[in-house]
Amino acid sequence: MIYLENPDLYLKTLLGQEGVPVTNDKESAAVFVYLKGNQLLLSCAPDPNTKFKSRSCPVRFITANNVPYFYNLQLVDINCQCDIPANANLGQSDRGLPFVFYDGGEIMVIPCAPFLTLRHRGYRTKKFYTQQVRCPDETVACVDRGGVRRLIAACLRMFFNQKNLPYIHLSYVPAGCKSIFGFRVDTDYTPIKIIKKCLSIPESFGMSWTWFIMTSEVTVNEAPIWAAVLSNQDVQLHCHHHVVYPDIKRNIANYYNGLKIMGFMNLRPSGVAAPYGEWHRAIATAFAKLGFTYSSEFCYAYDDLPSRPVIDGTYSPVLQVPVHPVSVGRLVAAGMNEDAMIEYYKNIIDLQVARNEPCFLYDHPLTIIRFSRVIKAIVEYGIHRCGRWMSMTQFAEWWTKREKSKYRCRVSGQSLEIDVTEPDPELELVIEFNESVARVPYHSGKYSLAGLNWTPVEKKLCPVDIAKIRHETPVWKLKNCLRRLRRQLRDLRMLRENPE
Ligand SMILES: [Zn+2]
């Protein structure tokens, strides 16, 4: 069990995503987690001795190839001022210096508290790794939420394991699965006849994709046809007009119109995905006011587990369900051929499977038709590697149930005791110990650690030249700056036209 000293909403978010058992009772705690200034401390005992020297310096990103417990992290964007302990010995910052300090037993110091990295809401254009010189890019969240979570989870795993204790957490996917695969389509300006053509792919796999509909393309007369064509699919709302407003009022009006059209399709969507993956307070508040239960915007999070954004000091009622943000169109822009595209997505799927995390990819109907060979190949590979497909709505519903689960566990010697408040066959506990992993069902019981079905963890090697994706030439910096400025000017212009 983990005891949290003065946790904030960001640390709670992150540990909730991991699904680790937290206790309010210091007696039953095996590890104590402290927020001390800008640092996060893991300790064996309450009130650890924290008299060590640190120095403040900006860190853009870290890599961790040489640390045995830090697998499948790849490159983690940090982008904040960190208080790095003078005797740091794990991981490597962009300046080539060690980042995390671990004394081998009593204490571990992570030089950035989650709130420092996770509270940021901006977006920027980032490159995503491929072997070729030109890497694809997309405008996504400035914060690497998934990366920061995986870094802190890796530290916890190492800390527990070095104390001869397993790292125990809820599985990131439903019971019996290693990972799950899902596919999202934003319909944008596509007419129904093109959508019909795309359907042959999910149908050939007996799969439901999640279709986010742009409803201004759906007339009242056509609505029943759309409903009939997509009857076996998961249908949700993209937008009415393909625009994100900087104010709450117009976003509500736009999505209210979308809901009205979907009403003509006899549908009441619970999920939504804003155009361009854009996310800010105004759009998030509009979604909450309209009663959506989940949304998916990569300007909030990408390649991560679901979470609830903190808005005005409290959790949003709208769950964020992240996808991998790079669609085929971005690969075309990077000059990739079809085989290279398939290779790119296979790597993404392999990485998410190695992490035991869900893998959601996304695209648009016209690209799906134009590159149907690529899409077929990656869907087939995704289902094969992940073991099971799920729609985003099914996954959001499962995650909402997972959020409510409560359990306790106790390890003494070789014995593991689990005590769950309410058993659930769709949940599972994952036990990680010294690069092996085992799973136990989510109900109360006693197990012998040695008797569990242990398998080696899957590791996806980090490319040696991964840091090239954060190499920013002056031209790249200027382009990024101009993109941001263009978005800000567009928002200012829209606000001036119609002040809130
Ligand atoms: Zn769109």
Image (cartoon, helix red, strand yellow):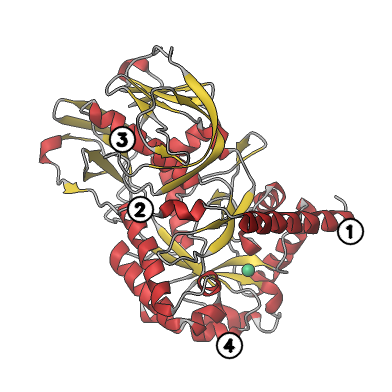
Instruction: Report the amino acid beneath label 4.
Output: Lys
Quadrant housing residue 131: bottom left
Distance from Cα at disc 1 to Cα at disc 3: 52 Å
Instruction: Report the amino acid beneath label 1.
Output: Glu
Q: Would you place residue 308 above or below residue 162 in this image?
A: below
Residue beneath label 1, please? 497
Residue at 61 percent across and 35 percent down: it is: 314
Q: Would you place residue 205 above or below residue 136 in this image?
A: below
Foreground label between 1 and 2: 2
Instruction: Report the amino acid beneath label 2.
Output: Val
Give the SS element for disc 3: helix
Residue beneath label 3, please? 157
- Marks 1/2 in contact by CB < 8 Å: the verdict is no
Q: Quadrant of the N terminus?
A: top left
Distance from Cα at disc 1 to Cα at disc 4: 36 Å
Residue 193 is marked as: 4
Residue beneath label 2, please? 464
Foreground label between 2 and 4: 2
Asked whether residue 442 appears in the rendered view, the answer is no
> Which circle's residue, 2 or 4, is located before the other in the chain?
4
Quadrant housing residue 347: bottom left
- Marks 1/3 in contact by CB < 8 Å: the verdict is no
